[in-house]
Image: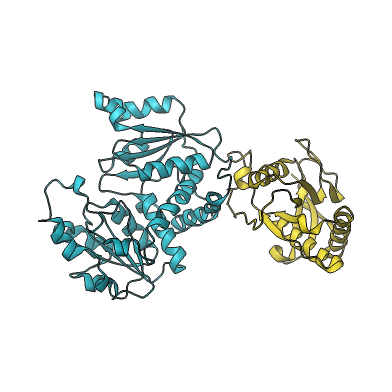
Chain colours: A yellow, B cyan
Amino acid sequence: MKYEKEILNAHELDNILTRLTFQILEKCTDFENTKIIGIKRRGAILADRIREKIKQFKDKDIEIGYLDITLYRDDLTEISEFPIIRGTEIPFNVKNKNIILVDDVIFTGRTARAALDAIMDYGRPKKIILAVLIDRGHRELPIQPNYKGKYVPTSFDERINVKLKELDGIDSISISKNIK
Amino acid sequence: MSFTKTDLLGLKDLSKEEILFIIETAEKLKEINGRDVKKVPTLKGKTVVNLFFEPSTRTRTSFEIAGKRLSADTINFSASSSSTSKGETLIDTVKNIEAMHSDIFVVRHAFSGSVKFIAENTKANVVNAGDGTNEHPTQALLDLMTIKEHKGGFEGLNVAIMGDIEHSRVARSNLWGMSKLGINVRLFGPKTMLPEHFKHFNCKICSSMEEAVENADVIMMLRIQRERQSNLLLPSLREYSKFFGLNKRALSLAKKDAIIMHPGPINRGVELPSILADSKQSVILEQVENGVAIRMAVLYLLSLNKKEG
């Protein structure tokens, strides 16, 4: 049996993204040298939305890239699902740029570490800022996001399910657990 | 889609979906080759041994580069310096290298079936880099990837494969692959290099070059495998070139946007004149480029699957 509870609806999700965008904008003035990179797949969608909000509030169009961290995972042979490569698309030079790195959930920190390694392979950015929608704790590496939408304390056997319109047809964040 | 094969021995053993999946993976990996730092840490700590019992430069280099781009330790082993020349059996050689904790063997051997034999006797993942006149799967996969890049897909394409079909493992692998992907294949070559059993591949055997190239989307020329012929099967290279080499007149019968392919190395002036080998329609160097991406994809996908026991 599965227990599942919604923790954010579409409206709340949008509000949190708006707040995240403003937090980023407070620190970001040099738009020419700022780029956004979203971690595939749902981080990439959230990155698109943050970019749209920056366009809306500041009338600035920031270049965006999408990162697939599969090839940088440190657990390739241990993961249960088959790692499909979705491809990285970074159409700009990251050297000396301020990079806003976006992901949906931060958990152990291994995805963020892989993303940092991957970005470094493209060049040496001036700064990387990590923005995530949900922080569910349980870090295994000393990595913290600069901005987080919501901290959701979870137990290890719970799951955070991020559903986004573009992929799942609905905007909703839920927490679930299998009950024996 | 998940890929469950532990060895890549030939396209005969792969399903249409598996062939397309390898190509799609390679398309994603190709981007790495254009970076300043052409390296990802995916196979860090893995050992890939290129066991080449037959001479090769481009395939071995391509596999070596592919392994290195994925951060594997790639080691080359060639027949001239191997213990097989001192009388050691093939399996003993393989077992010895396996005992050094190698993860993947890339094997080329002059005898058909030898790579399958090795795969059955080792715990390492095995990739066939050409076995006798049997198969050369990564070459066919890179050919298919290049065709896809130019033609957008496979279904219904007309492909003319011409030349020394009998001795070509490239042709055999392509025939397995292309028939699964819905490509119409036409074969043309000297009768001495076109044996009866090719009829079973559901392809058209043409009696003239004109018939083979007419309305073709792809023209694939093969190299004369002089090293693999026990008896000389043609009177002279000049005669071969005249009757079986591609020329401008024949090419004009193909579709205007037809591409010319060749697995290399070209015997310039025999299968292809330089004017065509270096023309805009020629995609020979793109094939070489895609070869690295395909081999990266194969090494990556096989490394995810450990053999039982």
Residue at (55, 45) in percent of width and height: B38
The number of numbered badges drawn on the structure is 0
Q: Is residue B88 left or right of residue B101?
A: left
Q: x%, y% of residue A45? A: 72, 60
Q: Quadrant of residue B131?
A: top left
Residue at (36, 35) in percent of width and height: B51
Q: x%, y% of residue B269? A: 23, 59
Q: Quadrant of residue B248?
A: bottom left
**In this rendering, does residue B284 appear at all?**
yes
Q: x%, y% of residue B91? A: 32, 29
**Residue pushed farthest left?**
B235
Front position in the image: B248 or B64 = B248
Front position in the image: B12 or A38 = A38
Residue at (34, 42) in percent of width and height: B57
Q: Is residue B298 left or right of residue A74?
A: left
Q: x%, y% of residue A85? A: 58, 52
Q: Is residue B22 left or right of residue B253?
A: right
Q: Quadrant of the C terminus of chain A?
A: top right
**In this rendering, does residue B15 appear at all?**
no
Residue at (40, 56) in percent of width and height: B285
